[in-house]
Image (tube, grey):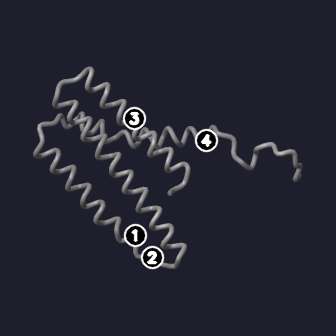
Amino acid sequence: MGSPSILRIERINYALGALCVLIALLTQERAAVLGVALGAGLTCLNFYVLRRLVVKWTADAAAGRGRSAVLMLPKMVGLMAAVALIVLLLPIDVIAFTIGYSIFIVSIVAETIYSGMRPSTDDAPNGHDHG
């Protein structure tokens, strides 16, 4: 499944991607909208696959099997190939594609800020004094 933090990052990524595409749809020309949509879609797909690989990798490591880390290389090659094909073959605005693809950074920063501001479960009052 993944940690709650990873799942929040993924959900934030989907929400920001949809918001960016909607804003582009309302304010930009077709090439920019297509660029933002493909960039956001690719980053969402990449994050989904990455989360699944990390969950598998962690489960395999806990079970004493260490082979699933090898799956990271084909994922990266596929991602690079997808970016190259999109940029070279489709009528997109490359800057808009970069903006759409970069939303994962904002998602990670948003989750980091959220997690940093949340009280930790160790600090939650539970009526017991362990001091």
Disc 4 or 3, which lies upstream in sequence? 3
Q: Name, please, the residue furthest toward the top.
A: 27
Percent coordinates x, y for residue 128 in the rendering = 88, 49
- Give the Cα separation between the discs numbered 4 and 3: 20 Å
Query: Hey, which quadrant is residue 95 in on the image?
Result: top left
Q: Residue at x 34, y 41 (%)?
A: 102
Label 1 sits on what residue type? Answer: Ala
Badges 2 and 1: C-beta atoms under 8 Å apart? yes
Vertical arrangement, residue 1 with respect to residue 111, above or below:
below
- Give the Cα separation between the discs numbered 3 and 1: 29 Å
Disc 3 or 1, which lies upstream in sequence? 3
Disc 1 or 4, which lies upstream in sequence? 1
The number of numbered discs placed on residues in the rendered structure image is 4
Label 4 sits on what residue type? Answer: Gly
Label 3 sits on what residue type? Answer: Leu
- Give the Cα separation between the discs numbered 3 and 2: 34 Å
Q: Is residue 129 left or right of residue 97?
A: right
